[in-house]
Amino acid sequence: MTIDHRFLLAGVIGWPIMHSRSPLMHNHWLEENHLNGRYVPLAVEPAKLERAIRGLNPLGFFGVNVTIPHKQNVMQYLDEIDPTALAMGAVSCIHAREDGSLFGKNNDAQGFIRNIKAQSLQWRADAGPITVIGAGGGARAVCYGLIQEGATEIRLVNRHIEKAQGLADQFGSFIKPVAWSERHTALQGAKMLVNATSLGMVGQPALDLELNDLPKDALVADIIYAPLETELIKHAKLRGNQAVGGLGMLMHQGPLAWELWFGITPSVTPKLQALLEKSLQG
Ligand code: NAP
């Protein structure tokens, strides 16, 4: 990939999109690396997705990230999809290649795992049972990443248990579906708890989960990053659990996209984190 004489154009496609912190992060990296380019928010309504995707190459985009609600639908317009994205049934990043073709990847799982490893050096996926709450797109990436890392038992709690069962059917017997009513006791003996629902996010009610049964040495992770600290993270910290918010998952996906588009690995630094945190606090 040659980037010498090209304006480095990339973006994020979603609907709505203006809440996304991805432009702030990627434009920070463009500046930090003294590169001539721009990362733009692209508000694309579902009915216009195909036209938008087909326009990426003619417009000179190197690629885009893909967010809600397009991660599944976009797959039909791509020329090639990597096996991880196929297994997850969703694409989070598209590379508009120089030959005019479109390649799709999913960086969500790796972003999640990289963040956990960066924040908890001792963490191991095979240390014991893991309880994951939620069975939507985020949970799918979390479970995929955990299984790749060697998780042997994932207790998957979801309001609509058939979605948890669907994930178990696809990903295998490591996933044990658990009814929503059993979520509190599903924490017994767990080494890790992950909230992958949208509960706790700005504008949503908090996740209703009693932590009494959760061992104090369990790692608690939330993939939500707005707010920076959900009620779950606050509560977990108060009772002495190590707790990791979702901002790092977003940050650790960025370099994977850059490697694909530009062949450059930007750094996830405290300065970037502070920039994003300030924006989220504002
Ligand atoms: P999604 O596919 O719509 O899934 C939403 C999940 O939340 C489902 O499991 C759903 O359960 C559950 N849920 C929603 N309302 C509920 C309620 N009232 N009671 C019980 N369960 C409820 O969404 P997603 O894409 O997975 O995203 C989930 C969250 O993760 C969002 O806040 C998103 O911003 C965040 N996220 C963060 C990152 C990151 O990089 N940090 C990446 C991806 C997602 P049902 O299946 O029963 O409806």
Image (cartoon, rainbow, N blue to C red):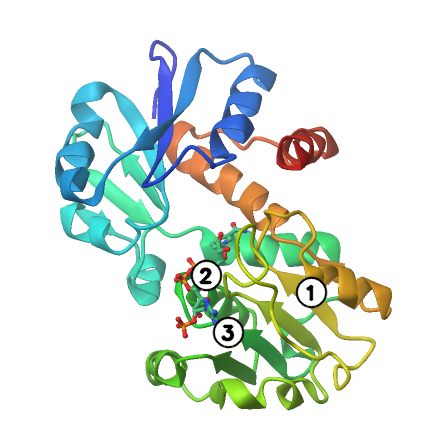
Distance Cα–Cα, label 3 vs label 1 = 24 Å
Q: Position of residue 126 (x, y in %)?
A: 64, 78
Residue 84 shown left or right of residue 201 in the figure: left
Q: Going 55% across and 12% down the picture, which residue do you hit?
A: 34
The kind of secondary structure element at disc 1 is: helix
Q: Going 57% across and 57% down the picture, which residue do you hit?
A: 223
Residue 58 shown left or right of residue 196 in the figure: left
The amino acid type found where label 3 is placed reads Ile
Distance Cα–Cα, label 1 vs label 2 = 17 Å
- The one nearer the camera, 221 or 86, is 221
Q: Which residue is mark 2?
A: 138
Seen in the picture, residue 226 relative to 171 is either above or below; the reply is: above
| Placement of the N terminus among the 4 image quadrants | top left
Q: Which residue is mark 3?
A: 147
Q: Earlier in the sequence, mark 1 or mark 2?
A: 2
* Mark 1 Cβ inside 8 Å of ligand 1: no
The amino acid type found where label 1 is placed reads Leu
Mark 3 surroundings: few (<14), some (14-19) or many (≥20) residues within 10 A: some
Q: Nearer the viewer, mark 3 or mark 1?
A: 1
Q: Position of residue 280 (x, y in %)?
A: 63, 37
* Mark 2 Cβ inside 8 Å of ligand 1: yes
Seen in the picture, residue 94 relative to 272 is either above or below; the reply is: below
Can I make out residue 242 in this image? no
* Callout 1 touching callout 2 (CB < 8 Å): no
- Residue 212 position by quadrant: bottom right
Mark 1 surroundings: few (<14), some (14-19) or many (≥20) residues within 10 A: many
Q: Earlier in the sequence, mark 2 or mark 3?
A: 2
- Residue 117 position by quadrant: bottom right
Q: Which residue is mark 1?
A: 232
Mark 2 surroundings: few (<14), some (14-19) or many (≥20) residues within 10 A: many
